[in-house]
Image: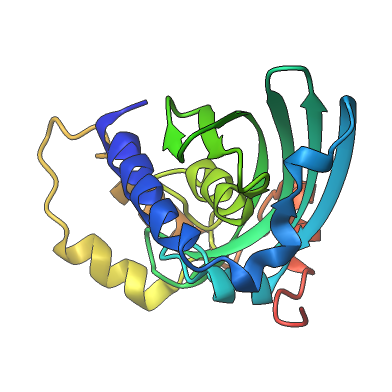
Amino acid sequence: MDKTDGVKKKSLSSRRFILRKNVAKFSLYNIPLKTLPLGTSTFEYVLDRKFFEAIDGEEVRKGNVSVTVNVKRTSSMFEFNFDVNGVVQVPCTRCLDDMNQEINTRNRLVVKFGKEYSEESDEIVIIPEEEGAINIAWFLYEFIALAIPIKHVHPAGECNRVVSSKFRKHRAVSPDDEEEDDEETIEEDFVNEEESQSHDPRWDALKGLDLEEN
């Protein structure tokens, strides 16, 4: 994890504590630990625009994401395995217009009972035994936010031409900057914009997704 990812993760974790005080509207995402049987239980969710608006995170406002959660209960802990797949809408880091970002991530969380809430590590959470449940709404949002690349841009030729042109003219990049090739990439976008592009067929499917309907 680089420095930027670390800052992003720290910011998300700090907001998790705020959400713990206001989880009433996310009751759908409560997992009743005390009543889970030994062995594996499965929960499924679809996170749509309403979810992202309610969670009120900075990184994502719209999306359509499917989540499968397998919870394995043993005598001493609960092991959560998350399978998260779908599409979210985020601003392109090059032109700032909204773009579809594919999400495909797997995450793990271990939950144990204790006297008070605490986080022993990124993957180990202690839940007060008297509460007997954990709300996973913010954890789901975190997994999605952390799966978004720091640099996310439209496929070639699909950026807002006016904004990208201004960006190209005004950004100052040192000769040693590892992102130096961005300007050449942007220039190629404009030269080839009206020519036929070779696209990943997965993006064609994503473009047809209407994130506004949910």
Q: Residue placed at 50% from the left, 68% from the top?
A: 22
Question: Percent position (x, y) of residue 167?
Answer: 25, 65
Above or below for 15 versus 98:
above
Asked whether, in this view, residue 192 is left or right of residue 208, the answer is left
Whether residue 109 is visible to the viewer of this picture, yes or no, is yes
Residue at the farthest bottom position: 213
| Nearer the observer, 13 or 83 | 13
Whether residue 59 is visible to the viewer of this picture, yes or no, is no
Above or below for 29 versus 89:
above
| Nearer the observer, 116 or 145 | 116
Asked whether, in this view, residue 126 is left or right of residue 32, the answer is left
Asked whether, in this view, residue 16 is left or right of residue 174, the answer is right
Question: Percent position (x, y) of residue 51?
Answer: 65, 70
Above or below for 13 versus 59:
above
Question: Percent position (x, y) of residue 40?
Answer: 88, 28
Q: Quadrant of the C terminus?
A: bottom right
Q: Residue placed at 15% from the left, 64% from the top?
A: 170
Looking at the picture, the colour scheme in use is rainbow
Q: Quadrant of residue 141?
A: bottom right
Q: Quadrant of the N terminus?
A: top left
Question: Percent position (x, y) of residue 117?
Answer: 46, 40
| Nearer the observer, 190 or 73 | 73
Asked whether, in this view, residue 133 is left or right of residue 92, the answer is right
| Nearer the observer, 184 or 164 | 164
Please state the total of marks drawn on the protein image: 0
Q: Residue placed at 43% from the left, 33% from the top?
A: 119
Q: Residue placed at 75% from the left, 63% from the top?
A: 28
Residue at the farthest top position: 75
Above or below for 154 versus 131:
below
